Image (tube, rainbow, N blue to C red):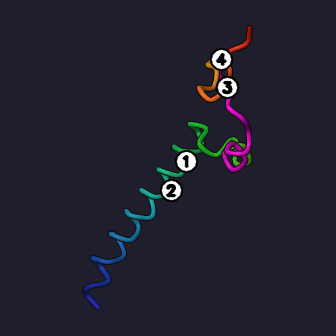
Amino acid sequence: MSVLYLVIPIALVLAGTGLAAFLWAVRRGQFDDLDTPAVRMLFDDDTDEPDSNREPRA
């Protein structure tokens, strides 16, 4: 029974730390855009460099 006096405060500190980290991430904007990173790989890169496999235009 005496171990509860040690475990409960440790659990509360860990839960508070997790909540503080979550609130910090929300305020920093980590969860603002959840859709774009999932489809970013489908977009073509817009680069100005010509492909090395193409023939140069005359």
Instruction: Name the spot of residue 50 as percent of width and height, x first.
Output: 64, 20
Dot 3 corresponds to which residue?
54
**Quadrant of image for the N terminus:** bottom left
Q: CA distance from mark 4 to mark 1?
A: 40 Å
Specify few, some or many for label 3: CA neighbours under 10 Å numbering under 14, 14-19, or 20 or more: few
Image point (32%, 77%), residue name: 7
Residues at circles 3 and 2 in contact by the CB criterion of under 8 Å? no
Judging depth in this view, the residue of 55 and 40 nearest the camera is 55
Dot 1: what SS? helix
Of the numbered discs 2 and 4, the one sitting upstream in the chain is: 2
With respect to residue 22, does 9 lie above or below?
Answer: below
Numbered label attached to residue 19: 2
| Amino acid carrying mark 3 in the image | Arg
Q: Amino acid at mark 1?
A: Leu
Identify the residue under disc 1.
Answer: 23
Please report whichever mark, 1 or 3, sits nearer to the chain's N-terminal start. Answer: 1
Vertical order, 15 against 47 (above or below): below
Q: Nearer the viewer, mark 1 or mark 3?
A: 3
Q: Which residue is mark 4?
A: 48
In space, the residues marked 3 and 2 are separated at their CA atoms by: 54 Å
Q: Secondary structure at mark 3?
A: loop
| Residue span colored magenta | 37-47
